Image (cartoon, grey):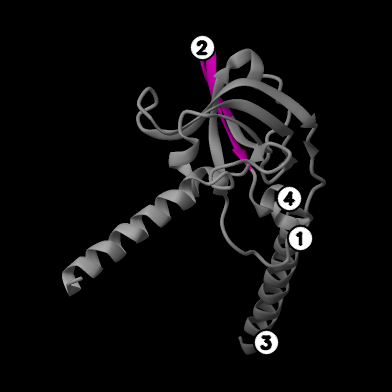
Amino acid sequence: MSDGKWKMAAALALVLLAAWGTASPAYGRPREDGVVTSTDLIEKSGSYNGREVVFRGEAVGDILHRGERSWVTVNDDHYSRKPLRLYEDLKGGNSGIGIYGATRELDKIRFLGSYTARGDIVEVRGTFYRASVEHGGDTCIVASSLEVLREGHPLPESGVRKELVLAFVLLAVCGALTALVLSRRKGRSE
């Protein structure tokens, strides 16, 4: 075989090997419990596109009502396990998926994750779209059902406000003492 034919055969073998790997049962499959992660959905979006999936995470932000249908973001990243402010070291970013579904389903959510609240942990069943034509090319899950697995709750005050008030009080006291000292010095010099 000539050198060019060997290169062509090697290239064809690599293409076939890659095709076999992406068609293998492990590629684009959910975990044993059937739940996919946002990382799975993004990294293997072609395999999941148009397929029914089960996705779990913390409902965050706001529910955006659009009549009988609504949007909400569900995060399943590292930070969805506990409130962000309780982490000592911040690593990585937030990751989640936009969920579009019937308002009556999304209205089951009582608590949305924020700085002041832990969001409901929800399980969403629906069809994943890596670039939904109907939704302007957004990556999303069009939900057929949503179940609240664990209800969220308000978070205790972090103490930041108390510390801020104390700082302003101390600043005012320092300012008053400084004004008193300066007025006494001025009175002595006259």
Tell me residue 150's x, y (percent).
81, 33
Is label 4 or label 1 in front? 4
**The residue stretch that appears in magenta:** 63-75
Spatial distance from mark 3 to mark 2, Cα to Cα? 74 Å
Number of numbered discs on residues: 4
Pick the residue in front: 154 or 19: 19
The residue that label 3 is drawn on is 188
The kind of residue on which mark 3 rests is Arg
Image spot of residue 29 (x, y percent): 59, 41
**For marks 2 and 4 on the same chain, the one whose residue lies earlier in the sequence:** 2
Quick check: 154 above or below 135? below
Residue under label 1, please give it. Answer: 163
Residue located beneath label 4 in the image: 83
Q: Which mark is residue 67?
A: 2
- Whole-number angstrom distance, CA of label 4 to CA of label 3: 57 Å
Side of 57 where 132 appears, left or right = left
- Mark 4 vs mark 3, foreground winner is 4
